[in-house]
Image (cartoon, rainbow, N blue to C red):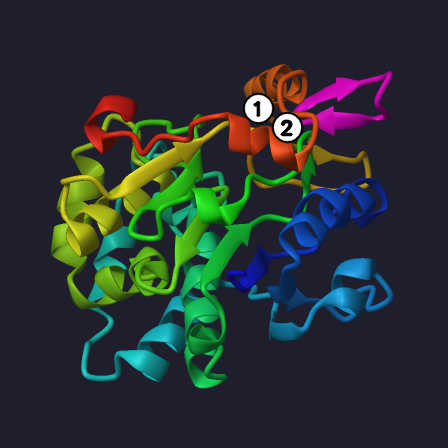
Amino acid sequence: MERTLVCVISQTREHKVVWDNFKTNVLDVLNADLALCISVTDDYDYTNPFWQTAKYKWTTHEYTDWVDSFEFARQTEFPEHTDRWKYLLFNDDRQANWLSPINNAPGAGAILIFFRWLLLHNLRIDDVLNQYDRFIITRSDFLYLCPHPPVELMNPKYIWVPDGEYHGGVTDRYAVLSRQNVEGYLSIMKHVITNPDLMYQRVMSHMFKNLEAAVKNTLDIEFGTDRYLGTFPYFMYSIRTKETPTRWAPGYWNEELGYFVKYPDEQRVAMHFQKIIANKEDWYNKRIETVDYELIVQ
């Protein structure tokens, strides 16, 4: 059986609502270990079940200025390169939110780029890459309406993502990776620091200048544009309670459920597949196809 590590990045949120669901439909189904790569504040709740369950815990402080996080990455891994990447920030197009909030645009694109780098950095220095066959990159605020698809149904040469929320690139919210492609997937920071001109040109040529475009262009550079992406049904959706602030989508309040649904399209698709996939065995009766990247990304 393949060994799987589920990696939650950036923050641990909404554990009172999502934890039991996450444990049942992801960790237990996959018999997976859990890793956290997150920021912690002085009042962080170390009693939360994400922290208590995690086998690996990699933390950083919450940056006041996220430029400092990129500089930390540069000086740690790319010291031969200057801070020329900063010229990317001098863009007054507020739609260019792939480096938000450090370019004063709304969103958290730069924060998530940093945490991808920090995760890869720690996977390497703690020699975790060789201990697992599959790596799942996710956020903590998902509700999963179906048991996770078996990873053995996903050809390890492809990067697997839920089929939706592309926004002109590749969804950044969830990915199933293998040992052979996890480093390439997590290498956005490398290209920002070492070749900012290329990343700027590629991302800014997109209709949506967002993190999804940065993910797409990183994968194009790392793996080429032949067939590197596979998809599976979007069986989860993200939520937010009233107590949790957000940098981007506030969501829509659902009185019956008692929380905000951040992205209604996620919920709609997940509820559809909830009617089809009732248990793990149902996945074996469905054919999960690798889809040509150019056919699924508009």
Query: Disc 1 versus disc 2: distance between alpha carbons?
Result: 8 Å
Q: Position of residue 4 (x, y in %)?
A: 55, 61
Image coordinates for residue 262, horizontal then vertical, percent:
64, 28
User: Residue at position x 64%, y 29% from top?
Assistant: 250
Residue 198's spot in the image, x, y percent?
12, 52
Q: Give the residue displayed 31% in from the left and 34% down from the top.
A: 290
**Label 1 belongs to which residue?**
266
Image quadrant in which you'd find residue 166: top left
Nearer to us of marks 1 and 2 is: 1
Observer-nearest residue: 167 or 219? 219
Quarter of the figure with the C terminus: top left
The answer to which of 263 and 275 lies nearer the viewer is: 275
- Check the image and report above or below for 32 versus 285: below
The quarter of the rendered structure image containing the N terminus is bottom right
Residue range (magenta): 250-261
Magenta-span inclusion, residue 256: yes
Residue to which mark 2 is pinned: 262
Relative to 52, is 290 on the left or the right?
left
Judge from the rendering whether residue 160 lies leftward or rightward of residue 7; answer left or right: left
Q: Is residue 293 left or right of residue 21?
A: left
Query: Measuring 16% from the left and 34% from the top, which residue is drawn there?
Result: 205
Q: Is residue 174 visible?
A: yes
Disc 1 marks a residue whose amino acid type is: Glu
Find numbered disc 1 in the image and state the secondary structure of the residue it sits on.
Answer: helix
- Asked if the residue under mark 2 is in contact with the one under mark 1, i.e. CB atoms within 8 Å, the reply is yes
The amino acid on which the numbered mark 2 sits, given as a three-letter code, is Lys
Name the residue nearer the viewer: 218 or 30. Answer: 30
Mark 2, secondary structure of its residue: loop
- Which residue: 24% across, 44% down? 228
Give x and y (percent) for residue 21: 77, 41
Apparent side of residue 203 relative to residue 275 in the rendered image (left or right) = left
